[in-house]
Image: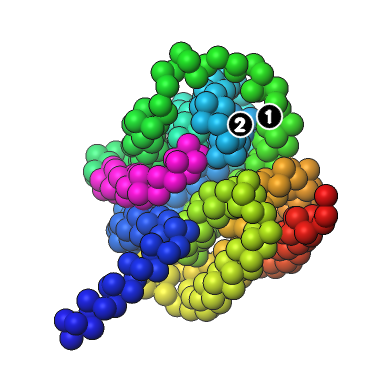
Amino acid sequence: MRGYATRWWGGIRERLAASPMLGGILKLAGGTGLAQAIAVGISPVLSRLYTRADFGVYTLMLSTSGLLTFLATLRYELAVPLPAAASEARRLVFIAAGIGGVSVAALTVLCQIWGPWFFTCVHLSGATAFWWVIPVAVATQAAYQVGYFWALRTKAYRVLAVTRIWQSLSSAATYLLLAWLVDGPLGLLVRLLLAQGAGVLQLYRHFRATSGEPAEAARGGLAQTAREHARFSVFGSLAGFLNASGILLPALLVGGLYGTAAAGDLGLAVRMVSLPMQLIGTAVAQVFLAEAAQLIREDPSRLQGLFFRLTRRLSKFGVAIAAGGAISPWVFPWVFGENWHVAGHVAAWVSLSAAAQIVVSPLSNIAILMKRQDVQLLLDGLRAVAVVVSLWLPWRLGADFLTATAIFSLAMLVLYGLYFAVYVTLARQLAAARREPV
């Protein structure tokens, strides 16, 4: 038995050594998996300590700050893994961080002026005192994204895995501690900020250790680098904002149309059915970005094969998500409490779009890597429109929350099919261009 185990482990190590991409995926998935296990483990406790409305406030705040983050840095960090020269990548880090700082300062002023009006529109007039959460959350999320793409460039998969675990431990401790110390959603909101701050600290340490030259030397030529990547930034920021709208805007719409309790149901349902996406899909997307960027620089003809290998593997997880969603109406009340039975039915519907998302979303970076941000912008704009129409129109016609959720999920399922067709076309175009004689 011991000999068999030794041979089995030896085979695993050989496969990891032969496939850096597989090793990267397993490191990220392992770290993310442990982080998600911590989050899932305390969820049944939190669902009994906080009300559906509390979760609704948290979900709406998270969605708002998440959307604004995609505009805060103009997405210059997306280009960090691409340059062959490390000095250019470092300059992109400083550009993104500088723009982010200016954006957060402006957002702070706007929140002071327009915050009460916004909270009233999304049925959160009681959360006006928490307006400061939005700019602080945007600052920490933006800083995390900048450090995250630098870590991808250096293929520091272990650092990213440890960062996720540290974030999850920080958030779990904050959740449980503040639940008994303060009333309402404040504990959930403070948890959001502390978890993000913990991740930023870890990634900043990695950047300092791997950035090489002093910061003063890296800052030379910032204006030229910013101009060279201006088109990338314009399309990347708009596409990122529209892409995030497809994920985060539903909670804002549901909160405004059906109330904070419905937003809480949607938030918990999406959080649970998205676990495989966060565990597997995000890890695959991170490694695909790093590996595909290298293939485009060295051997673009191999990109199509990488694309379809990952598609086949991710499809299996899509089937598992849909199957899990089918039993959610019976599982949710038992795990999270009777007050969350509506969330179980919501999970059954959103699992359909989540199954398609785990196949398509990790591969979406192919448009960015091929510098076809215009294509991604068009697709994400179409999805943003579909999100608004599929939720607002049923509400306008008098449909209840669950009916609107069903229509929304089916619309997203169709759109993910369109996304996949476009990404396949891009991969084939790159391979065909590589084969053409010069």
In this view, the residue in front, 343 or 37, is 37
Viewer can see residue 208 = yes
Which residue is rendered at x = 40% and y = 26% of the image? 212
Cβ–Cβ below 8 Å for labels 1 and 2? yes
User: In the image, which is nearer the foreground, mark 1 or mark 2?
Assistant: 1
Q: Quadrant of residue 348?
A: bottom right
Give the magenta-colored segment's residue range. 149-176
Relative image position of residue 202 (x, y in whole percent): 34, 36
Crowding at dot 1, Cα within 10 Å, few <14 / some 14-19 / many 20+, comes out as few
Residue lying farthest front? 438
Q: Given the image, on which type of amino acid does mark 1 rest?
A: His
Q: Could you tell me how far apart the alpha carbons at marks 1 and 2 are, in whole angstroms? A: 8 Å
Question: Is residue 103 left or right of 131 when viewed as pictured?
Answer: right
User: Would you identify the image quadrant in which residue 401 lies?
Assistant: bottom right
Name the quarter where the N terminus is drawn: bottom left
Tell me the element at label 1.
Answer: loop
- The residue sitting at the bottom extreme is 1
Classify 110 as above or below 318.
above
Please name the residue that numbered disc 1 is placed on: 229
Q: Position of residue 322 (x, y in %)?
A: 55, 75
Which sits in the foreground, 306 or 29? 306
Residue 401 seen in render: no
Q: Which residue is mark 2?
A: 76
The image position of residue 142, as x and y in percent, is 51, 32
| Residue 161 belongs to magenta span | yes
In the rendered structure, does residue 163 fall within the stretch colored magenta? yes
Q: 431 left or right of 142?
A: right
Which sits in the foreground, 190 or 338?
190
Residue at far right of view: 437
